[in-house]
Amino acid sequence: MHVSMTVNGEPVAREIEDRLLLVHFLRDHLGLTGTHWGCDTSNCGTCVVWLDGEPVKSCTVLAAMADGHEVRTVEGLERDGELDPVQQGFMQCHGLQCGFCTPGMMMTARALLDRNPAPSEEEIREAISGQICRCTGYATIVRSVQWAAAYEASQAVGSSA
Amino acid sequence: MTTLGTRPLDSFVDNDQKPVGYGRMLRKEDPRFVRGLGHYCDDIQLPGMLHMAILRSPYAHARIVSIDASAALAHPKVKAVVTGADLAEKGLAWMPTLSNDVQAVLATDKVRFQGQEVAIAVAEDRYAARDALDLIDVEYEPLDPVVDARRALEPGAPVIRDDLEGKADNHCFDWETGDEAATQAVFDAAEVVVSQDIVYPRVHPAPMETCGCVADYERVSGKLTLWTTSQAPHAHRTLYALVAGLPEHKIRVVSPDIGGGFGNKVPIYPGYVCAIVASLVLNKPVKWMEDRSENLISTGFARDYLMRGEIAATRDGKILAVRTHVLADHGAFNGTAAPVKYPAGFFGVFTGSYDLEAAYCKMTAVYTNKAPGGVAYACSFRITEAVYLVERIVDCLADELGMDPAELRLRNLIRPDQFPYTTKTGWVYDSGEYERALRLAMDMVGYDELRKEQAERRARGEMMGIGISFFTEAVGAGPRKDMDILGLGMADGCELTVHPTGKAVVRLSVQTQGQGHETTFAQIVAEELGIPPGDIEVVHGDTDQTPFGLGTYGSRSTPVSGAAAAMVARKVRDKARIIASGMLEVSVADLEWEKGAFGVKGDPGKSVTIQDIALRSYGAGDLPEGLEGGLQAEVCYNPENLTYPFGAYVCVVDVDRGTGQVKVRRFVAVDDCGTRINEMIIEGQVHGGLTDGVGMALMEMIAFDEEGNCLSASLMDYLIPTALEVPDWQTGHTVTPSPHHPIGAKGIGESATVGSPPAIVNAVVDALSPMGVRHADMPLTPARVWDAMQGHPTPPV
């Protein structure tokens, strides 16, 4: 079948098998290997991308379901050569070790901060509770998101001053 | 102590402002990871690459009657189907394990565990390869399985390993350590003896990235390149040379970025061998990536020890001896990845951190119809089991004596003046200040206040528990005289080159799976040479680019390879000193080293930097007599002993009286890993291990039904902690350098995985103790806690 969609702001179109999963479409057909695959059962969340601005687990979304929609992946977080504050926060606060769950975690974190610019620790933990990190023990991921929130708050103050 | 909410924005770290050497420094690997530009095995795409999938046994124990692959071969996208019979023709149906057993690559006669490899299909894409598996028709004749290790040695039990000549039972090995008679004498005379059956259930490391590889055999050059999820690329290369008969210089093993290892990626799995065979046969690159179910049911599990612990003491709380009998379930093949003289890994440190008069362990290992493995999941070669045993039995003793478990430990910890301390099972602990660490942990958690709070809550009917563990690790395998894996000594090489402009490249034999080697090894060299870490490139994970060594597992990178990095930098510095003496026209004895430069004693104006020296070493003009040009060196470091990190952990839990649900409210971890290279990375290693501990203590178990079906074959069934199950961690540290390590460092990668499960279980049992509970087995799920509350705790099966 034919699908066309917008991925990280760029239009793409491909002929694919009907059953192709979005995660494999992104990785194998578009070469966007920042989105990872980890479990098959929607438990681990390494495959989280945005579909029309909503985080989804791309291992349980057919590429066909993204036809005509907008997809954003970890490769689309950086804007004009500037890292997203979430990306900076993960580096500053050691929010990653092996890096495998990181893209999915960051996509969820970005979505959280877009809706709630000053989340509590509990709200951050709740937001990432559909995802698994085997390395960090989560505390540094929570700190990373808090760092990004604080950074964005400081930038907002700076721009209004 | 750091907690959430104490991280202001001014913690922004600018690496350019950091001092050269040790200290908190952001990771050099992170800029690629946060951009999604990591390069993992499944990211590799080669022209013409084919995809392989593995057909696995649905039975735990069955005879293979026939395999018909004709329908699969007729599939238009399928390029090949390979069975055990095909491999047998090439002599490749069986391969050696890391424990000198053999394991089927593809089953020929029988299948011996559910999930065992039976056939492979190779196709144009990964979906077609999967489709092909459905088209392979295998006829099985089911056999009675052996699932419960307790029944494996019963007369008449089905014999699993009838492939081994003369094998008539399921006995795998016996092993003992310590002095049986001396221990018996102490027990006979002891005022108090406590005994407890303790199970450490089968668990699985389940790294977020599953195992896989891309095999690419080039027919013309005869060179095989294998990109693979390996924690030990050099060892793998040598083993492929020995197994497949390929010349070793024509094998290149590359471990790209690895999405977590935890020991799961130490062994060679049948899938790797099959992908190599497929590439050889088809002259194409072949990719194989497991799915999650395959990872959980077929790759290296951990633990599965059934232990009886006994402890002897005086009435006033002097611990005299520890004794244990262990039944070890090794699954269908003995795939333990441990030094060959240590069939039970380093379980011999079950004597713990206590000054004992005697100790003895007797172990019997058996085969069962379960997946092979046995040393994985950040266990430090079975020290997780050892520490869990001793820390649980010490708490049982405290209960028997009516003594506070902290007080009992403080009375018995090895004293600082006793180091180096030789245990009753022959291990030489290098250094320790145990009481200082335990008292720090108790201060941090507010131990006395917590006990008061607990008393108040108990009076209100609430169930609060406080658990302590104290552990000593033995990491950094190991001295060549004692330790090898299949004959390969456990030393590690390191090569360092300083380029003419003073930038450096250091080549390691070990391989990061998230531990941050690209950062910490640059820091080690920076500390020794004064070259900023940003100017030092760390190369690892490619056998064509790095010196030989045994890889990263058992927390051995810093103890062994970290030592090699320091030693090679010192070798370079020694050469730089001679060049500097020529440049400054003074004798070597008149030079003094200040990080990054040699100066002339008593003449502060005269000095040359390491960068000046590097340029001179390659430049025109004479060098001091007898000196070759260039500034590089290599070493192969043979550790003199293991390093022995230690720690004191305190866990506070609340148990829901209505549901049995355990909530870890607080966790204080005090670790001592000697010299600290990068605080941030150490803290991360500890946090990750503590989370493993919550998983094992409360959630994780690879379970089987009585037919040998794995009941934990997905992440819906094998529960791993999320952010909601773990607390914010409170970490502290003491520093007791290792006396024999060049920079005084000890390993830290597995301390928390080893030390945290007993602290959590001790806390839960403490919460249940008013109900008369002295022990309950992991995982302490609500159901199991509930059973314990009702007075009938059940061991896991």
Image (spheres, rainbow, N blue to C red):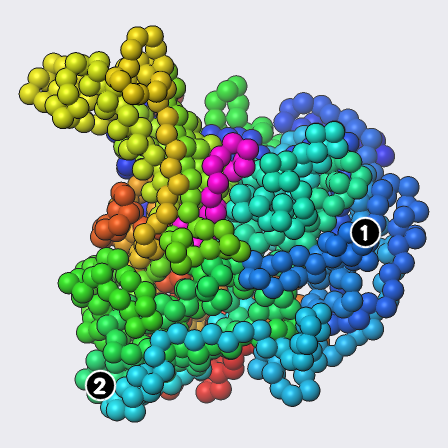
Residue located 75% across and 40% down the image: B279
The answer to if B765 sits in the magenta stretch is no
User: Which mark is on residue B82?
Assistant: 1
Residue at the front extreme? B626
Residue located 63% across and 27% down the image: A8
Amino acid type of disc 2? Thr
Amino acid type of disc 1? Val
C-alpha separation, residue under disc 2 versus residue under disc 1: 64 Å
Asked which quadrant contains residue B412, the reply is bottom left
Q: Which quadrant is home to the C terminus of chain B?
A: bottom right
Residue B432 in the image, given as x and y percentages of width and height: 23, 59
Give whichever of B150, A95 is nearer the camera.
Answer: B150
Residue bearing the label numbered 2: B314
The answer to if B550 sits in the magenta stretch is yes
Residue B660 in the image, given as x and y percentages of width and height: 47, 75
Chain under disc 1: B
Around disc 2, counting alpha carbons within 10 Å, would you say few (fewer than 14), some (14 to 19), or many (20 or more)? some
Residue B468 in the image, given as x and y percentages of width and height: 31, 68
Give whichever of B485, B784 is nearer the camera.
Answer: B485
Q: Is residue B468 left or right of residue B145?
A: left
Residue located 64% across and 53% down the image: B269
Q: Is residue B718 left or right of residue B566?
A: right
The range drawn in magenta is B541-557
Asked which quadrant contains residue B169, the reply is bottom right
Report helix, strand or loop for mark 2: loop
Q: Earlier in the sequence, mark 2 or mark 1?
A: 1
**Residue B98 visible, this angle:** yes
Chain under disc 2: B
Q: Nearer the viewer, mark 2 or mark 1?
A: 1
